[in-house]
Amino acid sequence: MKKKSLAELISDLKGSEHVVNWHEIEPRKARTKPMPDSIDSRIKTALGKRGIDELFTHQFSAFQSVQKEESIVTVTPTASGKTLCYNLPVLQSIAENPSNRALYLF
């Protein structure tokens, strides 16, 4: 049995009686904001070495909210940078106090 291609799988899903609505979101240019001044310079340097000189708006907002001790939920498409939404505040916390720790539960 031959494996189906992604295009074939999508075509099957679109034609399925179990899928009642199919909506595609058009790609759009990413929106960014400058790296907040409050981020530790070591973190900025490390991110810069990986080509990250700005934050996506959802990353920026998440960081600002966590800094104000607010809870966040981030829902964005795959590969849009959600990981940095929770790792950046943790890294910042550890940079401010090396004895700080985080427990990740997934």
Image (tube, rainbow, N blue to C red):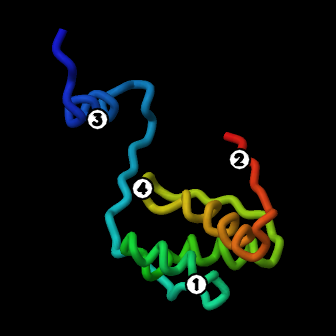
Name which of mark 2 and mark 3 comes first in the sequence. 3
Question: Which residue has dot 2 on it?
Answer: 104
In the image, 101 versus 89, the foreground residue is: 101
Residue 86 in the image, given as x and y percentages of width and height: 64, 61
Tag nearer the camera, 2 or 1 = 1
Name which of mark 2 and mark 4 comes first in the sequence. 4
In the image, 58 versus 85, the foreground residue is: 85
Question: Which residue has dot 1 on it?
Answer: 41
Residue drawn where x is 21% and y is 24% of the image:
4
Three-letter code for the amino acid on which mark 4 is drawn: Ala
Name the side, left or right, on which 78 lies relative to 84. Answer: left
Question: Are the residues flagged by discs 2 and 3 in contact, CB closer than 8 Å?
Answer: no
Name which of mark 3 and mark 1 comes first in the sequence. 3
Question: Are the residues flagged by discs 2 and 4 in contact, CB closer than 8 Å?
Answer: no
Distance in Å between CA atoms under marks 2 and 1: 24 Å
Q: Mark 2: which secondary structure? A: loop
